[in-house]
Amino acid sequence: MIQQNTQEETGTWDWITEPVAQGWKWAEEKIAAAWNWMKETASDAWDGIVGVISRIADVVVDALSA
């Protein structure tokens, strides 16, 4: 009786696609984190600009009403 070796072979592409898939996942995570940081920073900057303009408007209104 002849026995056949039934080990599961990994394909030739596995050694290429696995690192590429891991690299892509890493890049997606870094890009998402950078995008979120940029949105938060832009939002904080906009809030600061609005606060300054609001104070300037208050000073102008007080000066004109006096």
Image (cartoon, helix red, strand yellow):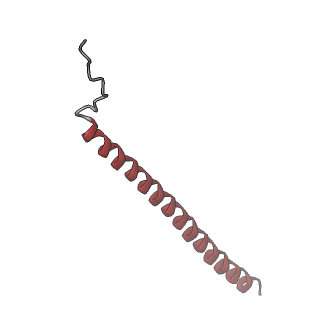
Q: Quadrant of residue 63?
A: bottom right
| Residue 58 located left or right of residue 47 | right
Q: Quadrant of the N terminus?
A: top left
| Residue 26 located left or right of residue 44 | left
- Decide which of 2, 13 is in the foreground and name it: 2
Q: Quadrant of residue 66?
A: bottom right
In this rendering, the answer to whether 16 lies above or below 7 is below
Q: Residue furthest front?
A: 1
In this rendering, the answer to whether 55 lies above or below 44 is below
- Decide which of 26, 1 is in the foreground and name it: 1
| Residue 38 located left or right of residue 27 | right
- Decide which of 28, 5 is in the foreground and name it: 5
Where is residue 15 drawn, in percent x and y? 25, 40
Where is residue 47 drawn, in percent x and y? 61, 69
Residue drawn at the location 50% of the way across and 63% of the way down: 37
Where is residue 24 drawn, in percent x and y? 36, 47
Q: Quadrant of residue 64?
A: bottom right
Residue drawn at the location 46% of the way across and 54% of the way down: 32
Q: Residue furthest right?
A: 66
In this rendering, the answer to whether 55 lies above or below 16 is below
- Decide which of 15, 65 is in the foreground and name it: 15
Residue drawn at the location 34% of the way across and 43% of the way down: 21
Where is residue 25 drawn, in percent x and y? 40, 47
Q: What is the tally of numbered marks visible in this picture?
A: 0
Residue drawn at the location 72% of the way across and 80% of the way down: 61
